[in-house]
Amino acid sequence: MPKENTGASFDAIMHDLKERKFAPIYILMGEEPYFIDKISDYLVEHVLQPDEQAFNQTVCFGADVTSAQIADMALRYPMMAEFQVVIVKEAQNLKNWEPLEKYSEKPVPTTVLVLCHKNGTLDRRKKTVAALLKHVETNGGVVFESKKKRDYELPGFIEGYLKLHKATIDHKASQMIADYIGADLSRLTSELDKVLISLPESRREVTPEIVEREIGVSKEFNSFELRDAIVNRNIFKANQIVKYFDNNPKAGSIYSFLPLLFNYFQNLMIAFYAPQKTSENSVAQYLDLKSGWAAKDYMTGMKNYTAMKTLQIISKMREIDAKSKGLDNPNTGAGDLMKELIFFILH
């Protein structure tokens, strides 16, 4: 599973939990609910034995309790168990954090207090909040910020998730899933679970054919195939895909394929400066790719596009990206912007 960049990582937290190394306080916050739910659900299910939970586990909501009440709960001692667990869901609804800041100065070591703050982060500019976070980290607690995955991170997330479940996926298939489902990680993992169930034990490999069958993504008309058509300057195929996207917005749109194409042409521009542009291995090394084979598309691109045209394409992509977000664009729809960009690239 990919690591988060801010504070404690998801991987590190889950590793400690599986080793039964529990922190006295967990502050789980951020825009991505998936990781927050994964951590809090694991704590609910694994800190206590089922027969210990009735007297030692409390789950409440921020809108229904005060910080003072939560602090009082946390000060209790477990009954015939090693720990007591207090889970506060939707902690973003709490009004006053001062009692919890005071509690965090000296948390009870037999309490596992979990604060789930979704749809944003605690405001570190506030003195009480800054003190709370400092006390939590100083006293062995965990502060975790769960960030939304960016589009370019999704294929890596998919590959990592499947690897955890002893399955592999090729790059085209992972890009197909990422483009079709997007950054809703709960839905994404649900679809991946569906794919995993369909795999035979003798062949744990996810292919574009399996993605098409199990998730409903066309293996012929997707962002990956559009990129391939553009790399090879296949005007007919590219226009076929764009027309399909225009009629089936869920299959693909400018928002899904623009980052993929921008990344390609950005690297292609760099490839023109490679010391030995005729050697796949040299270009791969210059672009920090894994193998010479990975440079194949850039070798093809340098034959089909000049450096000047590549620079113009990158500039056009920036313009289209701004227009897709409403900048200097009063009424041109995403479909027309998509067609405008593809025409500019291929002609």
Image (cartoon, rainbow, N blue to C red):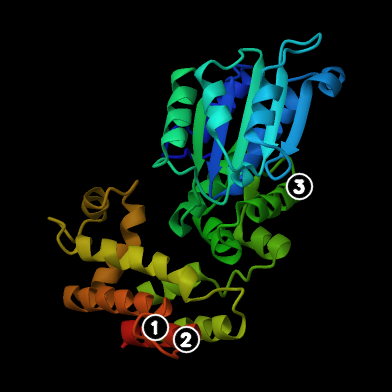
User: Which sits earlier in the primary sequence, circle 1 or circle 3?
Assistant: 3
Q: Position of residue 228 (x, y in %)?
A: 43, 70
List the residue tagged with mark 2: 239
Q: Mark 2 and 1 residues: CB-CB less than 8 Å, in contact?
A: yes
Q: In which quarter of the image is the N terminus?
A: top right
- The local secondary structure at tag 1 comes to helix
Q: In this view, does 88 lie to the left or right of 328?
A: right
Q: Classify mark 3: helix, strand or loop.
A: helix
259 relative position to 29: left or right: left
Badge 3 crowding class, 10 Å Cα cut-off, few under 14, some 14 to 19, many 20 or more, is few
Residue 197 numbered tag: 3
Task: Choose the circle earlier in sequence order: 3 or 2.
Answer: 3
Cα gap from disc 2 to disc 1, whole angstroms? 8 Å
| Left or right: where 59 falls relative to 312 | right
Quarter of the rendering containing residue 212: bottom right
Question: Is residue 227 something that shows in the picture?
Answer: yes
Give the label on residue 342, or none.
1
Name the residue: 63% across, 52% down.
206
Q: In this view, does 46 lie above or below 263?
A: above
Three-letter amino acid code of the residue under disc 3? Ile
Q: Is residue 111 above or below residue 268?
A: above
Task: Assess disc 1: are there few (<14), some (14-19) or many (≥20) residues with their C-alpha within 10 Å of its C-alpha.
Answer: some
> Where, by quadrant of the figure, is residue 70 drawn?
top right
In terms of secondary structure, where does tag 2 sit?
Answer: helix
Residue 289: % across, % down? 32, 49
Provide residue 140's location: percent of width, then percent of height: 50, 18
Within 10 angstroms of label 2, few (less than 14), some, or many (20 or more) residues?
A: some
Q: Can residue 232 be seen in this view?
A: no
